[in-house]
Amino acid sequence: MSAASSPRPGSTDPNKRGPPWYALRGGDGTSTPPAYASDPKYKKYTQQVEKCLNSFESVHEWADFISFLKQLLKTLQSYQQFKEIPRKLVVAKRLSQCLNPALPNGVHQRALDVYSHVFAVLGSEGLQRDLALWSSGLFPFFEYASTAVKPTVLNLFDTHYLPLQSGLRPIMKSFILALLPGLEEETGEYFDKVLALLDRLAGTISQSFFFQNIWLVMLTTPPARGTALTYLSRRLPPFKPDEDITPIVGDDLGLMIRAFSAALEDDDLLVRRAALDILLQSLRIDGVAVKKAQDDDRAILMRAATSVVLRRDLALNRRLYAWLLGPSESTQAQIEYYKVHSLELLRSTLKDEMLNPSPDYSQSRPFKIFISLLDKYEIGLPLTEVLVYDAFKCLQQLLQSGQDAGDDLSMTGSTLYEAVEPHALWSRLLSAMLADLKPGQCNREGCAMVKYLLQSFHSHDEEIETIHLPIVFNAITGILTAFNWNDSSSFPAASDALSLLPEILKRIPHGALKSRPALSTQAQALEAEMDAVVFAYKFYGIKSDTPPVGTKRSAAPFAIAMEDLVSLTFSSATALLKGDEDVTLSRSRRDVLLLSSSILDALASRLDDEVDGQLIVSWDPDAWLSTMFECLEQRNVAFVTVDRFITVAIKLHQKAQLQPSFDLDKRSYITPMVRVLLKYLRPSFSAYHMRAVNLIWALERLSKHPHVEAVISQSLSVRRTSELQDACEAFGVLWRLTEDIALPGVHLKVPMMTVLETLRSDDPKLRRIGETWMRCSLKSYLRVLDPILFDLLDPTIRYIPSTTELRGKQLQGFSYERPFDQRYVNYLLETLLSVAKFGGQGFSKVARSTPISRSIYSGLLQRLQSVNAAFPEATYMDVIVSQLLMRFLQSEPKQPLLPTMQPFHIVSQNLAVDLLQPLVARGDVDLITLQSLESAVVQKLYFCVHTGRLDLQNKLLHLLHSVISSSISGSEGRSHATASQLERATDGISPQDGPPMTKKETHAVHPLLVQTLVDGISVPGNRSLLQHWLDFIMMTVPLFRETLKAVVTPLSDCVCRQLRLALTEILDVSSSGPRSDDVVSYTTDADFLMLLTALERLTLLSMTRIGGEEPQEDDQQMDKNVQESGGLLGYVSGVFSSDGPSGATDDSAVTKSSDYRCLHNAVRVLYGMWDKLVVAPDSDWGSQEESLSLIYSRARTRAKRVLEHLFRAHSTEVLEAVVDCWHDQAITRPESAETSSAYDLVDVLTASAQNAVHMLCESISCRTPGLSERTRKTVVFPDLLDMTLFEFLEQYMKRLEGPLALQVWNRFLQLVKDLLLTLRDFRPQAFAALKCFTVLADKVTQTTALDDRRLRKDLQETYGKLLDICVMSGRSVESGSWIRRSQREALTTNGRDSPTPTLRATEMKVDEKNASSTSLPLPDGGKSAYAGDVAQQVNSYVASDALPSLRKFLVDSDKILAACNQIVYNIVNPALKGKARPLDLEDDIVAIIREMTRISVAVKAWRTPVVESLNDNRCFNSTAEAGEKWMPMVKSLFDTDKTALPELLGKITTVPSANIFTNREYEMLLRSLNLRRLSYVILSAEKNHFLAQLPSIQEKLVDTLRNVSAPIVQSEVYLCVRVLLCRLSPHNLSSFWPVILTEMYRIFEQILENIPGDGSEELGLILSACKLLDLLLVLQTEEFQIHQWIFITDTVDAVYRPDDWFPEALLDRLAEVVGALPATESIAPRSAAQAHTPSVPTKPMRRPLLHSLRQIDSIRDLVPFFSTASISSYESVYHSGGVVDWQAVEKGLLEDLFEGR
């Protein structure tokens, strides 16, 4: 019921009423009634009463109370002729105070005697008129009255109150509240009397009105619920289901339901039990009351009733079950009753609470109720059937939204999954999945839900895993086999189902698919013939419109699954072969084929476990295989599908259990599979290479015949060059990725020889293909040599030693004994020649260094032993030269054999000579010809690169290398010395270490060469020749001795660029998981290794000049300076030398910087690879995983080696470059600063953390002003700032363990000490050092090293000094001498960049002595902005890190206090100075003070600023937000200083000052401010914190109310009372109520008599009183509820007003009186604007109506409050369920305390 629908005050015509009661009242009890105004006796009577009342001021003990009451009674009895009590307001207040429960019975008895006399004098009419005055003391007293006094109280009620009859209507609720405590003891002597009184009270108005007030009492007053239910159990009649109960309980059934709901959710078990008893007796769920109630009300009742199960109390549960299941004893009847009347309401209530969880309860509450209800089978099973699916759906939404604070929800979900009946759960889940699979179904969620449940909540459950999952698995596969694969709409559902099946299969234990579970007896006969889908329908009792037709006859679930999946793969492959032009349909069919193949793969793996004997499957293996092969050879099937099918085929190959089985070892089967796999070995499928290679070898192992070799040979026998190139590349990948142990040269000899033939082909294209294969794929020459040598050592080739004599000379040789296959031998020799020619020195090195005994090929070793066992340690080269080539060269056929063998023999010898030729010398060409040739070759190369002609490039590069090397050899004259020196230089050894060189004529670099080389590497079409180009660069570039830099820098940049592109491509491939489309990527591990090798060589070459020549120049420059400034005055001339650096040094710095750029760029690329190429543990790459893992690991390892090599040669430069990379990464991705891989890299490069920290400290030293002259090191990277190094050092130290931190301690401590020596005032470096020091000190303090006195002393002193300097940051803004930077740097806003060290050491000294004109001073604005920002960071750091660590680091109390004093002096005090709002400080300053208050020894430091801020008269000009932030500090102040509160109370004076010159207005203002301080102090504390001081506070407030009449001061008293209400338990304020009530009554009565004018100073006091009342109505404390009828209508009359209703409550009367005033023009709009009093709060919580009202200019501004207070209070009680919005209440108090002006 909203306020809008209820009658308003003033809605009826006032002229048609009789005079209201309040028209007869005598005002506030101080004025004289008109009838007695002129009566002198009445005046005397009044004087006597006043005299008597004044004596109350001197009451000190209980005897004084009795004498006061005797005197008062005697005075009243002396004037019985007057039917009026003078000064009745004060008399009523004193009588209330005399009924204080703490006083003895005698005082109570005397007070009641006075009440009795007063009531007798006043009579019913007088009592009716002044009910508010006299009831306020009596009503709350009855509860505490002693046994002796209770009869008197009851007698007063009976005698004087009940005769009022309908006059009791306004106080009905309060009267009931007053009497209910008498029903607490059913055996008590007053129980029956109180019960009778309540019965008579119910008869005064009407029974329904009485019961409605009982509902209100139950709703608003928890302590009264038990007694109210006791009354109801005796007086509320049992109702029949169809009986109309509104005449008895009232029209508002919602109110009654909310009352019972409140009782059902009460904390007291007995209250809950009594409420459930009444539900069973009078509020049955099938009754008219529940059925007629609104849906919201029924849900509220059900929510409250079901909550009792959470108490785990059997008595409560039994009653709830009885209420839900009905009165019948029969189980079947109970279930019927439950399903008809309770189930739907219970389901909708729980579901609604699951979907929209209340913030008042845990989100898991409805799920826990559901779990508890499962204990009762009759309730749980039907509820499971209708709710379980929705419950899990809601759980999923809640968990995925991330609202689960702890693991509460997920634990509840697991419990629910385990508790729910599996049969019911899986029946519902299967229904949802079957619904998904219906044609045309749009909203699919069943399969996703089952997958979620299995992944999130399923743990081992035997019943689910052995019974339900197999049935569901078979049912889904059965449904899928009947799908129409030509309908595109059916695919999404099929994909969902197919992706779910592996999850189900994974959880079915091995052996669980052997047989089905049993059905009911009548269905068992049909079970054997029943289809899997029909079986599932029968088993779960699922009704279907179109029951499936059974087709399969097998009863074994595994056989059914195999048949279904074979059928699925067959049908999807067949559909795919139809070649539908619809791309989407084709893709969907591919997905289905992939998923079904994957599941078939999983089933095939379980074949041995699931089948005991034979597994007879109705399938045609040949048809299935041929269809699948045909499908595989189509271009649009992805590799993942190929992988799955071949894996399945291999698993099913020759399985004896499977009938019919099949044998894969046939050429017709192997051929299509190997063909498809070879297609995936092409360069564009590098992601799948590794897996394809493994599958080919699996087929090779499976086959007893050389089918695989034959197929590969067939692929290499094509005529077209492009096809041959593809075939060679595929075979090359197979060869390269095969391990040596597999003997690829033996098993794949025919294709290997086919490829090697191309090396000697006349066709340059064929030759290029062969050479590329050799260079990129060979992996090891031994693989080729083993089979060739095996055939060349054929035992049929027989030699015998022979001696031939010619002209008297004996020639040793050999002769052939018999003919052999010379053509084949020549073929082998030609092949070996081509290999040796191609291999060159690499071939020679391998053959020379490898003993042949290491060969893996056992056949070769056996042949060697049979031929010759003379060389046990012979190498391959020994065998080739000695056993073969020399034999062929030395041997001749025997004479008879000459005609047939000679032609071939000559060829053999030619080949042998050619093979020995690579060991012989080279020829020279003159220089002029060489230069012409070089030019022509460079130009041709350039042409080839850009026209995409690959065939010529390799030869040209070789030729060009020969030309250049010959040219340089000719120009230098000593090629040997040059080569040896350069070899050393590229390994990081400077040429100075070698012999001195004389300068030669320089060989000029061809202008086009560098560009040609860059293009050769960069053009994508040259990818296959990349290795040739890089080889050429690495062999040729070192020869450019004098012009090295011009060549190296662009080439280095180019290689870096190529590495970045390769890295980007491989990361793009990695970013996608398994998918049905193939991923195209060309980058392989070999690409990375090639480029990295080139980068390493080029970078080292770029550094040869820096490492070798320039230090020499620097030394010469220094010697020259020393000589020039020699003699005694040398030092002086050094001091007065020019400030600017010399030109020579500048040039040298520029040269160095540009030279270091190559190194920097190289480190950037290498760092990128180190950072990015990490295999994530959760990466799901699918089929490309094997290749990607290989590429990642090899490339990252090589990058690491390159970095290590560079670091060994140039450690500082590499480390600084890594830090620079880290800095860039931290800027772009700040979240990575703490987890960056840079720290691991530094650990890898440096031998220890000690080395790393030492190097970083050195780098910092040479950059920091003041420290740079202490080190002779020069700055390598000027762009890298000392602040960046400090930041890196800080993060690096955070990762160190205690022992490591101890190792680096001394080095870092030295740096800090050196820094401190140079600092006179604050510089940013000090702040950076403090942060690093704090991190390191924190680690060190956790070790035992702190026991070392010296270390502890160093730590304390250094930390103290650093902190002292840093806290001066705010004061450094004025000095400004420390900032020396360019305009751009000065204006950076992060405050971390340090000045660039552009000045050398000597210049720095000069700069310290006199301001240098070379530095650029900051403009004032920029300087202060920068410094201010640093100061802010320092403040923030002090608050967050420094102060919490003080006690740990500076153990000594004096040192802690000194540090805190420094912080207060330098940071806090300046921030507080001159503030118009003392509490409005920056967050950092407030945080500093708050942290300091937690340090016990620092009280002396922080106490003064806090006290001064609080005592500042402008304190409350601050904002409410600032006031809230200061509350912890104020609390700490009053906790640590016990004299502070008495001191503050002492300042609140009530006696006027005796000084005649005092400004009274200012004096009142000071009093009000002191009262406000008291309020703020109390608000800052926790609940009941100042309970011990309450008497003093209460006395001070009462004293102020009595003696200070100024409205401004009294307003503060009401504000303080509001704070006390929020900070003290309500029962602690019971003695305060008479005073508060009397004062509020007086204020409101006074408004009625004398309405204050606009702008009156009384308005502020009235607003304060209204706000106090507003808060009391919100809090609804038990103590106030019994009085609230005085101020508002607290019965149902607030909403349902009777026809003859007159306003009795003060606010309702004020609404009529003030509302009737004429509105003025200036006021009216304001009133309308302020009238924002919503009848129902937007959020169902109680909050004050006057929350936003701060000030009023007219009493009319309060009309909205007066007129809606009653109805708003009623409705907030009705809707909020007693929940108070404490946040709004406290915010309102703060806003009233702090004006924010």
Image: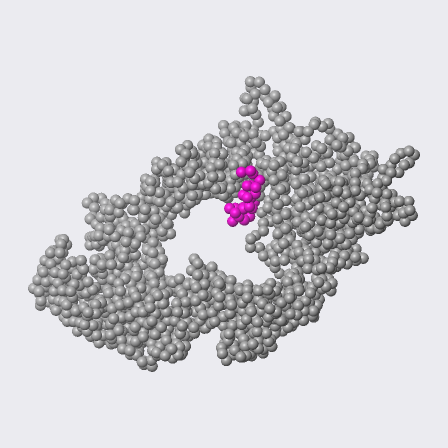
The residue positioned farthest toward the left in the image shown = 78
Q: Quadrant of residue 1696?
A: bottom left
Name the image quarter holding the N terminus: bottom left
Image height of 551 relative to 1739, above or below: below
The image shows residue 1126 at horizontal and vertical percentages of 59, 20
Please say which color scheme the image uses. one colour
Is residue 56 found left or right of 481 in the rendered image?
left
* Residue at x 52%, y 79% (from the top left corner): 523
In this orientation, which residue lies closer to the viewer: 1053 or 506? 506
Is residue 1361 found left or right of 1579 in the rendered image?
right
The residue positioned farthest toward the top in the image shown = 1128
* Residue at x 18%, y 72% (from the top left corner): 192
In this orientation, which residue lies closer to the viewer: 333 or 1079? 333
Q: Quadrant of residue 1183?
A: bottom right
- Residue 1136 shows in the view: yes
* Residue at x 68%, y 33% (from the top left corner): 984
The image shows residue 1120 at horizontal and vertical percentages of 62, 23
- Residue 1411 shows in the view: no
The image shows residue 639 at horizontal and vertical percentages of 66, 60
Is residue 1235 magenta-colored?
Answer: yes
* Residue at x 47%, y 39% (from the top left corner): 1299
Q: State the predominant SS element of the stretch in magenta.
A: helix
The image shows residue 736 at horizontal and vertical percentages of 70, 51
Q: How many numbered markers are drawn?
A: 0
Image height of 1417 relative to 182, above or below: above
Is residue 1694 found left or right of 1270 in the rendered image?
left
Is residue 1149 found left or right of 1440 in the rendered image?
right
Is residue 398 magenta-colored?
Answer: no
Q: Which residues are magenta?
A: 1224-1248
The residue positioned farthest toward the bottom in the image shown = 242
